[in-house]
Structures are given as C-alpha cells and as structure tokens.
Image (cartoon, rainbow, N blue to C red):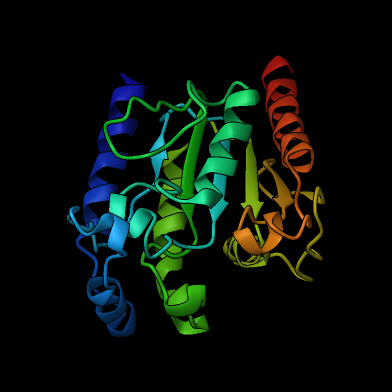
Amino acid sequence: MLGVVTSDRLSSLSGAIVACRRCPRLVAWREGVLPRACFRAEAYWRRPVPGFGDPDATVVVVGLAPAAHGANRTGRMFTGDRSGDWLYRAMWRAGLANQPESRARGDGLELVRAWVTASVRCAPPANKPTPAERAACLGHLREELSLLTRARVIVALGVVACGAVSSLYGLSPRPRFAHLAEWELPDGRVLVCSYHPSQQNTFTGKLTEPMLDAVFERARALAEAVQAG
C-alpha cells in the first residue's frame, strides 16, 4: 500500500511540475525553441519535465536541466540526446535500467531501483538557468526527494546539480565538487558527484565511459550496503 501511495504522490507532483509557469524567461524559451530539421515532423513537448523511474528507487540521479532538443522535445529526462545516451548506457551496465537506450516516451525504458530528475525542469537558454530560476525550481526537487523515501544515494551530474542538493540540505560549507567525490548528508543519504555527460565533457575526454561506470558502480554499492545493514 505504501508503494501505491508514493506512486500516487509522485504522479501528483509530476502534474504540478508540468503545469508550472513560474519563470517567464524559461517559459518563453522552452516554448519558442525552433525544431531542428531532423525533428520537424515531431511535436515538441515544450513544458517542464518531471522526474521518472522507480518509486522504490534507492539511487536518485540529479541532472542540470532538460536539453532544448532532448527532454524539451521528448518530455522525458535525458531522452533523445547524446547526454542521455551516455547516462542510460551506464545505468544499464550498472543494472539500474532495463535497456541502454532512451529515445522517446513509450520506448520501453524502465529504471530499476533508480529515479532520474533535474535541478531545473525547463530547458534554459545556453543551458544556463539563472540563480533565481534555480532557486524557484528547488522546491520541486525537495518534494521529490521527500517522496522517494527509500533513496539512499543521490548522484549529482555536474556542479549545478551538486549545488542544488547542497542547498536543499543546507550544507555549509558547500562540498567542493569533484568527480567521484562523496559526502554523507544529514539524513544519512550519500551524495556522489560526477561530471555531467554533456558533449563538452564526453567529446573532450574529460568524462569517459569507464569514469561514468565507476560512479554508478559506487552508487549501487553504497545503496546495497545500506540495505544490507
């Protein structure tokens, strides 16, 4: 019964997120993005993007924000772009996803004891939400994490996501971001940081697939250790 209640509450939160129009600049940007030539036959989502995955997740992945032609097009986090290709391949190899691809909603992707979300829910210009926009969106992540009661590990993809989680938990001083850095949070959860799988990082070799695999191997090991204890 508890799982059903959690799922219902997450569904209600998703509805509230999708309906949000709190930040005028982001609303205008997400709705005005011109489709790329290869996607012109598709109807873009153009709304805030809710998190998705397993309500019984023990691992929560927090990204930056939807990509203009990724989640802003498909309506699902890290779906339809190269960052998502990297993310879900790594999660699949770690046993946290049932398939290594995430092309569109309804493609059969299911997460296993994992949840994927972001610190900001609307696609921002140049992938750079303002501090005010990040603050305005933080409540969605706070409520999401409160509902994911079995979550034991939070994986932050990039500096902005790490900062969002730090703000939620009131960490002072804030953790210094580094790949594979980790901190125990006040509620006993563990924050694990990773470089974001953006093309800027993957094309330059700053982030490699073995490096991303190490993040999810560590996250899964921490989650399983807590469960076993």
Can you give x and y, in whole percent of width and height, for residue 27 in the image? 26, 76
Task: Look at the picture and state if 207 lies above or below 129.
Answer: above
163 relative position to 70: left or right: right
Q: How many marks?
A: 0
Residue 196 visible, this orientation: yes
Q: Residue at x 75, y 22 (%)?
A: 225
Q: Residue at x 34, y 32 (%)?
A: 6
Which of 209 and 180 lies nearest the eye of the viewer? 209
Q: Residue furthest front?
A: 37
Residue 167 appears in which quarter of the rendering? bottom right
Which of 189 and 45 lies nearest the eye of the viewer? 45
Can you give x and y, in whole percent of width and height, for residue 32 in the image? 24, 77
Residue 198 appears in which quarter of the rendering? bottom right
Residue 169 visible, this orientation: no
Can you give x and y, in whole percent of width and height, for residue 221 in the image? 75, 25
Task: Look at the picture and state if 163 lies above or below 96.
Answer: below
Can you give x and y, in whole percent of width and height, for residue 70 in the image? 39, 55
Pick the quarter of the image with the C terminus.
top right
Task: Look at the picture and state if 222 lies above or below 129.
Answer: above
Pick the quarter of the image with the N terminus.
top left
Q: Residue at x 41, y 26 (%)?
A: 110
Q: Residue at x 53, y 62 (%)?
A: 64
Which of 195 and 205 lies nearest the eye of the viewer? 205
